[in-house]
Amino acid sequence: MPQAPQLLDFSVDEVAEQLTLMDLELFSKVRPYECLGSVWSQRDRPGAAGASPTVRATVAQFNTVTGCVLGSVLGAPGLTAPQRAQRLEKWICIAQRCRELRNFSSLRAILSALQSNPIYRLKRSWGAVSREPLSTFRKLSQIFSDENNHLSSREILFQEEATEGSQKEDNTPGSLPSKPPPGPVPYLGTFLTDLVMLDTALPDMLEGDLINFEKRRKEWEILARIQQLQRRCQSYTLSPHPPILAALHAQRQLSEEQSYRLSRVIEPPAASCPSSPRIQRRISLTKRLSAKLSREKSSFPSWSPGNPSSPTSSVSPGSPPSSPRSRDAPAGSPPASPGPQGPSTKLPLSPDLPRPGPLPLGSPRIPLPAQQSSEARVIRISINNDHGNLYRSILLTSQDKAPSVVQRALQKHNVPQPWARDYQLFQVLPGDRELLIPDNANVFYAMSPAAPGDFMLRRKEGTRHTLSVSPT
C-alpha cells in the first residue's frame, strides 16, 4: 500500500496557498467583539470553555501550523544535517510565499516554530542552510520584531493598505482600473495585543461615574479595522486541495517535552548554537505599552503609573493553546496556551543556550529589569481561595509597594479593599517554590527577576472574613 504523501512533498506554492485559504476562512469568521480585552479575558473563567470560539479557532489553526513545522523538522531524528537543512529551507520558502500572498498569520506561525528553542539550537542543521534562504529568514523575522517599527507587522499592514488606496487613485481616465491585491490576512495577535494594552491602560469609567468614551472610541477603531480587513479577504481566489489538507492534519504534532528531547538527540547540548541565525529580540509588552501611551498622550486621559489607583485591567493577552513552548527559546517561542494558567513546567535546558526572544499572538513575556527601558511590567496575581486559580493582570511600576499592589489585586478580584492588610503577596517560582514579598517592600525590586511574573495572594494566618450580603 503506497504511503500517503507528507506535507513537504507538495510544492511551496501549494502548501502556502492552502495555509492562506484556511487562515482567511477562519479570520473572515472572527466576531470582532470577541477580541476585546474585556471579553477575551473571560475565556479562562470556570464554565467559560466555549467563550470567544471564533478567536480560539484562529488560535488553534496558528498552533497547528507551528506544530507541523516542529514535527516535520524534528520528527525524523535519523536525518543528516544537510537533509534537515533542506526541510528548514523549504519552510523558509513557504514562509516567504505566505508573505507574498500577504498571509501574516501562517507567516508568523512558521517563524515562531523556526525560532523556537528545539529548532533554533540545531547548530549543524542551520550551518548547512544556504546563504540565500538564511538571509530570507532574517528579513522575514524582522516583520515581527518591534525593534524597528517600520518593519513591524502593524506598520506593514498600514503600508500595504496605503499602497492599495494609491492604486485606486492612480487610475488614469479611460484605463481599466487596476485590481488591488487580495487580503491581507493579518496576524490576529497584533490586534489582541493592542486591545489588551488599551484595556490595561485605560479605565472603563472616569471620575464622577462618567463613561470613558475615549477608550471606547479607540477600541472601536481597532474593531472597525478588523472588519475592514475581513471584507478585503473576500477577494482571495483560492481553491481547497484535499490531499494537502489531509497531509497537514496528519502531520505529527510534538509536545514541548518531545520537541526538546528530540532536539537533544539530534544535537547533544554540548554543541552550542553560534551558527544559528541571529534574530533581534522583540520589544516587551510593557515597553510597547509605554510607547503607545506616549505617542497618544494627548488623547489618553492622564494617569500616573505610580499611583495605586492607576487604571489596570484584569486581562492578559493570550496565545495559541497546547503548542511547544520554552521560556528559554533563543529567538522566539512558539505559541502557548491562551490566557492565564499559572507557572508552566520548565524544560531542563542546557546552560549554553541563548536567552529568549519574541512571543507570538500577543502573549506578554515579563521582561527582566535589565532588558527594559521603562520601569514597569505587567504581572498576574491570583488569590488562594475556593473559587479557582484565576489570574488578574495589573501594571507594576518601580514605585509600587506591596500594600498598594495587594489592594489593586483585591480590587481586580472583587474582594473588599479594607481586607488588604490581611493578605500577603507571594511570587510563584519554578519548582513549586514561592517568594514572600515583605509588607511595605517595593515589589518591583523585591521580586525575583529570573522568574515569571506570576504572583499569589494568600490570607495571613489567624485572619478571618465573613462576607455580608446587602439585602436587595
Image (cartoon, rainbow, N blue to C red):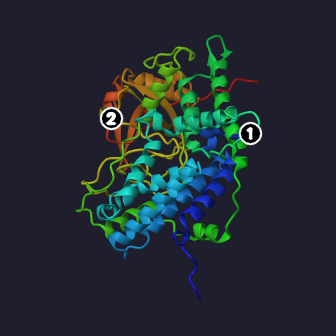
Q: Can the viewer see residue 107 in this picture?
A: yes
Q: Quadrant of residue 457?
A: top left
Q: Quadrant of residue 471?
A: top right
Residue density around tag 2, few if under 14, some if 14–19, many if 20 or more, within 10 Å = few
Residue located 64% across and 19% down the image: 214
Find residue 226 and report its horizontal and vertical position in percent. Answer: 66, 38
**Front position in the image: 188 or 201:** 188
Name the secondary structure under disc 2. Answer: helix
Q: Is residue 137 left or right of residue 371?
A: right
Q: Which residue sits furthest top? A: 208
Provide the residue designation for mark 1: 175
Q: Which mark is residue 371?
A: 2
Residue located 47% across and 34% down the image: 150
**Front position in the image: 153 or 373:** 153
Q: Distance from label 2 to label 1 (Cα)?
A: 54 Å
Q: How many marks?
A: 2
Q: Residue 158, relative to residue 46: is it above or below?
A: above
Residue density around tag 1, few if under 14, some if 14–19, many if 20 or more, within 10 Å = few
Find residue 370 and report its horizontal and vertical position in percent. Answer: 29, 33
Residue type indicated by callout 2: Gln
Find residue 277 and report its horizontal and vertical position in percent. Answer: 33, 53
Q: Residue 35, relative to residue 97: is it above or below?
A: above
Picture quarter with the C terminus: top right
Residue located 37% across and 41% down the image: 281
